[in-house]
Amino acid sequence: MNTASKHKLSKFYKYMSAEVAKKVLSTNTLRWSSPLLFNDPFDVPRELAKDMNIANMLAASSKLIEEAVLNFEAEISYLAQDFYKLVLGLRRIKYPEKEKPLHEIREGQIFQKIDDYLLEDERQNWYEMLPKMRILCLSARKNIIPMWYHYADKYQDVVLELNPYTHINSERPWPMIFPVEYPDSFPELFTEKGWGKLLISSPENRLNELITFSTFIKKPDWRYEEEYRLVRLEETKSFQQYSDDVFSEKIISKIYFGPEIEPRNREYLIKLILERFPHVKAYDMNFKFGWETQLERIICSIYYLNDII
C-alpha cells in the first residue's frame, strides 16, 4: 500500500477521556473500532464506487492497457496476471500485426469477464468487511491543542504515550502501523478512471489499494491530527462492532494530564499507575502564554499512594 513507507516514530499518543483511561489502565485493554462507529461521515467510505458506471470504468481500463502496450516504460507490475501477460506479449509484436489486438482492446473485447457483477461483488465484499474491520487511531504528538480540546474533553482528560512495538502477543500480534495521508488532490478511487485501474489490478494490489484509499486517506481538514492507524480484521462479525484487545503492560510509557482535569480523576489514575504500571511516568500538561505547552513531572511513589487512598 502507498502508506507502507517506513516512518521513524517509535512513540505514539492516544487522546482519551478520563473515564476511558480508567478502563484502559484497569483492564489492560484498548478499544479497536469498526469504522461504522466513526463520527466523521467522510472517514472510511460506507459504499464503494457510488453512482459510477462500469462502462466508463472499463473504457478507462482499455486506455490503460493500450498505453501500457505502446509505452514500454509504463508501470505494469500492478496488473492482474492475465493482463500482465497480454501487455508483455503485445509489446513484442510489431505493426501492422499489433493493430488488430489494439483495436480489440479499445473496443473492450478483452473484458468479457468483467461486468456489473464484478463491481457489485466488490461492493458487497466491502459491505461485509466494514463490520469486521478494527482500527486503532493514534497521533504523532502529545501536544496538539485541537486534539486536547476535541478528544480529551476540553483539556479535562488525558493522553497516553504508547510504543506499539513493545506489544508481544503470539495469539493476536498487532499489525503494522501506518500514517494517514491528507492529500490536497482528489484520490483516484473517487473517479471512474481510478476504478478502471483497480479492476485490472491483481487481487493483492486491489485489496491494498482499497485499504489504503479507505482507511489511510482523509480530507486535508483533518491534517492537524497527524494520525497513525493500525488496521486488522476480525474473523467473525460482531454485533457490538468493536473489540477491547488486551495489550502488554510495557506498551504504555507515559501519561499526561490535561490542565482542566478533575482532581478526583487525576488522583484515581495516578493510583492505577502506581498499582499496575509502576514504570509509567506521569506529567501535568499546561498551556503557557505564547502558544507553548509546559510539562511538569509528577513524582509518584508509594508515599504518594498512601496520601491519596
Image (tube, grey):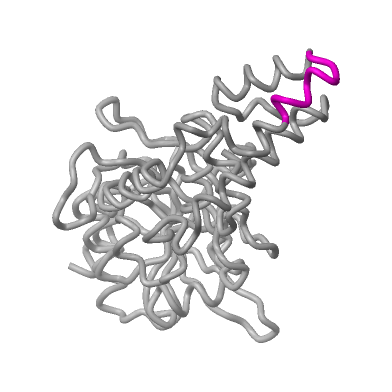
Q: Is residue 110 magenta?
A: no
Q: Vertically, is 193 above or below 168?
A: below
Residue lying at 42% horizontally and 83% vertically, measured from the top left: 154
- Place of residue 166 in the rendered image (x, y in percent of width and height, measured from the top left): 42, 35
In the rendered image, which quarter contains the C terminus? bottom left
Q: Indicate whether 224 appears above or below 137.
A: below
Furthest residue toward right = 95
Q: How many marks?
A: 0
Residue shown at the point (55%, 21%) measured from the top left? 82
Question: Which image quarter holds the N terminus?
Answer: top right
Q: Please provide percent x and percent y for residue 273.
A: 30, 55
Q: Nearer the viewer, residue 35 or 89?
A: 89
- Front-most of residues 302 and 108: 108
Viewer-proximal residue, 234 or 293? 234
Q: Residue furthest bottom?
A: 289
What is the quadrant of residue 184 in the picture? bottom right
- 19 sits left or right of 167 in the view: left
The x, y position of residue 117, in whole percent, is: 36, 43
Magenta-colored segment: predominant secondary structure: loop
Q: Quadrant of residue 230?
A: top left
Q: What stretch of residues is rendered in magenta?
A: 93-102
What residue do we see at 31% from left, 41% from top? 233
On screen, residue 196 versus residue 41, left or right, reads right
Determine the residue positioned at 40% across, 41% down. Answer: 118
Residue 32 appears left or right of 203 = left
